[in-house]
Image (tube, rainbow, N blue to C red):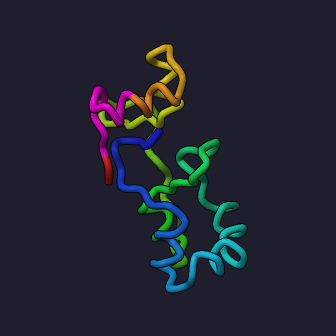
């Protein structure tokens, strides 16, 4: 879940902000980063991170804590949405592709 619809980024975005190729980031920097900053969708194929946490890590600042508890602006991934709707994640993706579900991006 993306708490409070906060901006997020993936590892390619983080590598770009760090000024290194994504392959270098994943090989050299990502293991230490992943130990300090948790993905907002830990079981997802593409790891997504909170923008404020990633920027704090890159700047060497303390990593801010994500807001706790449910909030109306929280965003769900396809698996979480599927659990709510009682369908499969692939059905949720198909619904979104067909325009039956609203898509939100950063």
Question: Which residue occupies the extreme top position in the image?
Answer: 86
Observer-nearest of 12 and 33: 12
Observer-nearest of 43 and 54: 43
User: How many marks are shown on the rendered structure?
Assistant: 0
Q: Residue at x 52, y 29 (%)?
A: 89
69 relative to 97 in the view: left or right: right
Image height check: is 55 above or below 106? below
Question: Which residue occupies the extreme bottom position in the image?
Answer: 19
Q: In the figure, residue 94 lies in which quadrant?
A: top left
Image height check: is 70 above or below 16? above
Image height check: is 46 above or below 78? below
Image height check: is 12 above or below 48? below
Observer-nearest of 46 and 17: 46
Q: Residue at x 58, y 76 (%)?
A: 22
> Residue 98 in magenta?
yes
86 relative to 30 in the view: left or right: left
- Look at the image and give the residue range highlighted in magenta: 95-104
**Residue 13, image x and y in percent?**
46, 69
Q: Quadrant of the C terminus?
A: bottom left
**Residue 52, image x and y in percent?**
42, 62
Observer-nearest of 70 and 94: 94
78 relative to 71 in the view: left or right: right
**Residue 56, image x and y in percent?**
48, 70
Q: Residue at x 30, y 43 (%)?
A: 104
**Residue 10, image x and y in percent?**
50, 61
> Residue 43 in magenta?
no
By secondary structure, the bulk of the magenta-drawn segment is best described as: loop
């Amino acid at each position: 879940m993306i708490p409070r619809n906060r901006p997020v980024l993936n590892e390619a975005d983080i590598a770009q902000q760090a000024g290194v190729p994504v392959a270098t980031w994943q090989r050299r920097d990502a293991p230490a980063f992943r130990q300090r900053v948790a993905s907002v969708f830990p079981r997802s194929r593409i790891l997504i991170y909170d923008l404020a946490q990633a920027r704090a890590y890159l700047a060497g600042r303390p990593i801010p804590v994500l807001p706790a508890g449910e909030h109306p602006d929280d965003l769900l991934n396809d698996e979480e949405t599927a659990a709510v709707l009682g369908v499969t994640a692939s059905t949720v993706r198909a619904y979104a592709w067909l325009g039956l579900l609203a898509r939100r991006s950063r």
